[in-house]
Image (spheres, rainbow, N blue to C red):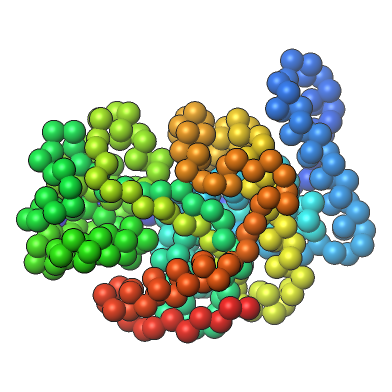
Amino acid sequence: MAISRRSLVKGITYTLVLPSISCMFFACAGTQSANRSNSNNETNADSTVVTANKAEGEIVPIRIAYPAGMNGQIAKVMEKAKIAEKKGLEAKYTFFQNGPPMMEAFTSGEVDAVITSPMPVINFMSRNPGKAFVVASLGNSSYSLMVPKDSSIKQVKDLQGKTIALSFGSDSHLDFLKLLKESNLNPKSDVKLVNTQPNELQLAFERKFADAIIIRQPQVLKLQKKLDAQIIHTWPHRYISVMRADYLEKYPQAKKKYLEALQEAILFTATNKEQASIWFSEQIRLDPETIRQVSKDDPNYTVTKLENVSVEVTPAIKQILEDWAKFSYETGIIKKEVAWNWK
């Protein structure tokens, strides 16, 4: 069963600029909400810090890529709240609809840091050993195995003989292969898997091109609301960030600045939920309320203090990545084993 593919939406690049007239503008807007006033105050403070950093010659350029998934909210907040500038970074942001084209840009050296998830990184590492480092763990969202409300599929074993649409080489692909193995189902003979681009999965579901799909948030919630779609299984969608090795060699001070910016962006998102969701909704064209509802999957969404925000790549996260890479190799998703270098 073939599903037509549309051209991948190319990244749109945004360059941070210093706010030169924001104080004058907002001083005239006496009816602004409290959240927006707080945001303006933080922006003005950031501008002062950026000016000081420039005077001291500490500004480091960085090009950051992020996807349409919920992890993209971190980068959008970092951009709109001028957080990277506060940390001494001159940041340029590029938005991508999904992982493959984003990692292609990373491979070609068009971006220096990527906010993503494990499988795009594992694919990259298997082809480009030693070219990047996992520098941050950024919480999680989720993705789910979904079926129509009137489907006869009620549990995983009911998938035998069915067609499932999913994105090959993705995090959900690997997790689904694990689930099939645990359920004693052969992915080559017991089910039919159809490779479908992430932005086409909802259409595949609505037009019944497949009996089931595996799709990430916020589309899961959208399908529940719109079609009363049913969830058979849900997995955590883990978020990480990687930086190019050659970039870190050129700018060794960039990692610390970048990690601090990530922490502050996570805190801002958690403590300014409405504003953060509005910013991200403008990027992915989804209502802010849905974004806030889906964001509750992330344990970082409840933090109230910076010291409670950890982006550390813990031993547990390292083990997960190593296990995933091993299973990816065993199942043929990647052709070469990954040699991890935990810098």
Residue 244 left/right relative to 222? right
**Spot occupied by residue 253 in the image (x, y as percentages of width and height):** 77, 70
Nearer the observer, 92 or 53 = 53
Tell me if residue 111 can be seen.
no
Q: For the point 64% across and 47% down, which residue is it?
A: 266
Residue 218 to residue 100: above or below: above
Nearer the observer, 8 or 297 = 297
Residue 55 left/right relative to 30? right
Tell me if residue 272 can be seen.
yes
Q: Quadrant of residue 120?
A: bottom left
Q: For the point 54% across and 53% down, which residue is it?
A: 139
**Spot occupied by residue 309 in the image (x, y as percentages of width and height):** 66, 52
- Where, quadrant-wise, is the C terminus in this rendering? bottom right
Residue 44 to residue 198: above or below: above
Residue 305 left/right relative to 237? right
Q: Quadrant of residue 157?
A: bottom left
Residue 9 left/right relative to 213? right
- Where, quadrant-wise, is the N terminus in this rendering? bottom left
Q: For the point 71% across and 21% down, which residue is it?
A: 33
**Spot occupied by residue 121 in the image (x, y as percentages of width and height):** 47, 69
**Spot occupied by residue 29 in the image (x, y as percentages of width and height):** 77, 19
Number of numbered markers: 0
Q: Quadrant of residue 22?
A: top right
Q: For the point 73% across and 20% down, which residue is it?
A: 32
Residue 315 to residue 92: above or below: below
